[in-house]
Structures are given as structure tokens and as C-alpha cells.
Image (cartoon, helix red, strand yellow):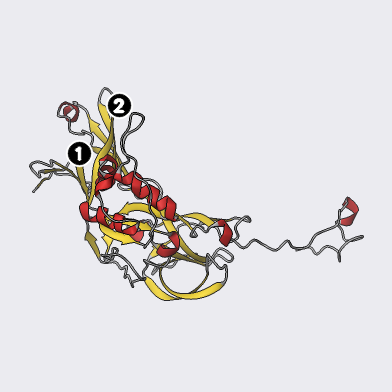
Amino acid sequence: MAQIDSNTRETNLRFVDDDSGLQVNINNSILSMSVSYSADLASQISVVVHDPDLQFAKNNFFHVTRTVFFSPETLRNYQDPGIAVRSPEIMLDSTTEYRIQIFEIAAAELTQGPGSSAVWNIELRPKTVQQMKRDINARSYKGKGSEYVKAVCEKYNMLPLIEYTGKMVSISGANNSKAADSVWDVLSSLASEAKFVVYESDNTLVFASQRFLLGLYGSEHSDVEIIDPVTSAPVTKRLNYIPARWPSRSSDLLRLVSIPTIRRSDNDPLEVRGSMSLDRLSATTLRPGMTIRIYGLPYMDGLYLIDSVEYDYLGNQPVSVSFRSPEREKKDIRQFDIGKIYPALYNRSIDGTDFGSGVIEV
């Protein structure tokens, strides 16, 4: 049982004693808390804790590697157990449940707080990822490519979301100049070799290409015309996605609070990066790897992968979400046509006197 303080704000954080199993709630001492999920860097929870009489300091309460349980609201059926071999129909609705995410203290900083009191700045990161970084027995896991990743999942009790690859990497042992490769080093190298992403999300180890993830998770399931990232030709596929419409409607699952920022590059006409601010309702349940479909923004409409989700857990500010189109290899990029080549122009040419058919004012 957790020790519960009377409080007015619930952080859903519980600091755990691994030996006794005791869970401790320190909600009354937490000043602020922000959550960041990412497909590129480690997901992180940043917590500021008030320690006026240094009791936390005296008891070594925030020692590095201490386990912390986090139970945010998550949308039902977010995770599909087992190795995904096709795009399952995943339903996201207003039904919520509490799924415990296991973090650990990765960094703790004691600093000056209000008046003469002290505060702690605590950084929490996924425990399984931190453990893999400490696991230098990388050669003990059997199999190559995807089978190696699956063996790691089994060791750390993680759900696998794995795309097949037969790629292999060499595993370095310890020598006089450097330490042995960790399990996380090997996973990162495998992902780089296969042009995959690798990250943890809600105790699921994602090891797949961005093409594989596009259309895998969403609230709606329908036939969608997309541009194939390899052939650059339009194709129709049955995909899952979460609609994000501008302007938003009251019935929308995701509600935009402003026009998204979206950038399309001329070097790669299908390479898109963007960000958007969403109303907190439902948006705090988004995770990297989910697919959104943007409506209402001509030329920028389309399907995109979420790659980060950030929000102030105790506040009421909008949720910040960044997204992108799947990465493509340079050989698969079809460039724009060269287009019309103009002769040299001079000031007297711009009004149409010597070139073109004149100027139309709009």
C-alpha cells in the first residue's frame, strides 16, 4: 500500500523502495512537474521538490536509480501486444485506465529554494532503458537483428513492437581504452544500421522504421491515399490515424488551439516537420509513434508521425506535439522538375513591357 498524504494535487508519482515494496507519495512537496515523451531522446519527467528542512537530503531520498512509478491517464488499447506484423485496428476513446510506467531517478540536483529553504531538481527516465545502458553483458542475448531485440524484450519484461531486420552489428568487449558495449548501445547500433528508430513508450520497446509505424495507431481506420515514400507515387492503403482538424470542432478527439506550424522542404518535397498545440483533453494520452491526419490546411494536409509530446503535468497549458513525415533514403527522393528557365531580367521588364503578358494586381 502507498503512504498517502492529504493533498490537493495528484501527481500520480510514487517513490518505491525496491526491497520492501513500500510506495511513498510526496505530492505536498512537489512544486512543479513536466512530462516529455520522445522518439529521438529518452522520455523524461522533470520534477521540482521543496525540501525546506533538508529531510529528503538527510534521508538520501532521491538517490540515483531509485524506482518511481508514474500512472498517467492513457487511452484504452494503446498498446498491441506481440510483434506487430500488420496494422491492427486500435480504438482510442474517452475510456481511461491507469497504466503504471516504471521510471527511475537519473539525476538529482540540490539547489537554493525560496528564502533559506532548498529545492531538488529531479530527472526521471524509463527504468528499463537506464538498466539496458548499465547492462554490459550484450553478448549474452541470442539471435541476430530482430531476434536479438526480442530477446532483450523478454529479459526486461517489455512488450515488443518490432519490424523484422536481419542486420547484424559487432559487439565490442571491454579493453584498456573503453568499456564494453551496453545492451542499449547494441540496440542503437542495430537501429542505425537498419535505418530504424528505437525507443521505449509505456513499457513497449519500439524497434521499427518510420514507414512501418505510419498508420499503425489511431482512432479512425479507413482507406487513405498517400505518397509512397519509396516510389513517390500515390497509393491507397487502409491505415489508422487520429484526426487533427483546423478549425477544430467540439466533438473532435484532438482540439487544436492554434494553426499548426508546418514546414515542407524544397530539397525533399515530401519531407515535412511540424508542431502543434492541443487542448489537454485527450492530448496528454498521445505518444510518439502514433499517426495524426491533419485536415483543413491546404498543401499541408496529410498523415504524419508524432515524434514528441510535452506538457506541464500540474498546469492547464496546452500540450505541445511535434510530428514529421517518415524519413526516406536519398535514392528514394524524387526531386522537383527543373522548371521554366527565365532570361536575364531588368527593372524595365517587371511591368511586362519587354517580357511576359503584364502585371495582374490582386
| Vertical placement of residue 161 versus 219, above or below | above
Q: Amino acid at mark 1?
A: Arg
Which residue extends farthest top?
Answer: 116
- Which of the two residues, 305 or 139, is positioned nearer the viewer here? 139
- Which of the two residues, 75 or 6, is positioned nearer the viewer here? 75
Judging by the rendered image, the residue that carries numbered circle 2 is 111
Residue 14 visible in the picture: yes
The mark lying in front, picked from 1 and 2, is 1
- Which of the two residues, 276 or 103, is positioned nearer the viewer here? 103
Give the side of residue 290 with respect to residue 333, left or right: left
Disc 1 is placed on an element classified as loop
Q: Position of residue 154 (x, y in %)?
A: 22, 56
Residue 319 visible in the picture: no
Residue 162 sits in quarter? bottom left
Q: Badge 1, how many Cα within 10 Å: few under 14, some, many 20+?
A: some
Judging by the rendered image, the residue that carries numbered circle 1 is 66
Give the side of residue 251 with respect to residue 338, left or right: left
> Which residue corresponds to the image point at 39% horizontal and 74% vertical from the top-left?
221
| Vertical placement of residue 295 versus 322, above or below | below
Q: Position of residue 326 (x, y in %)?
A: 48, 60
> Which residue corresponds to the image point at 30% horizontal and 68% vertical from the top-left?
93
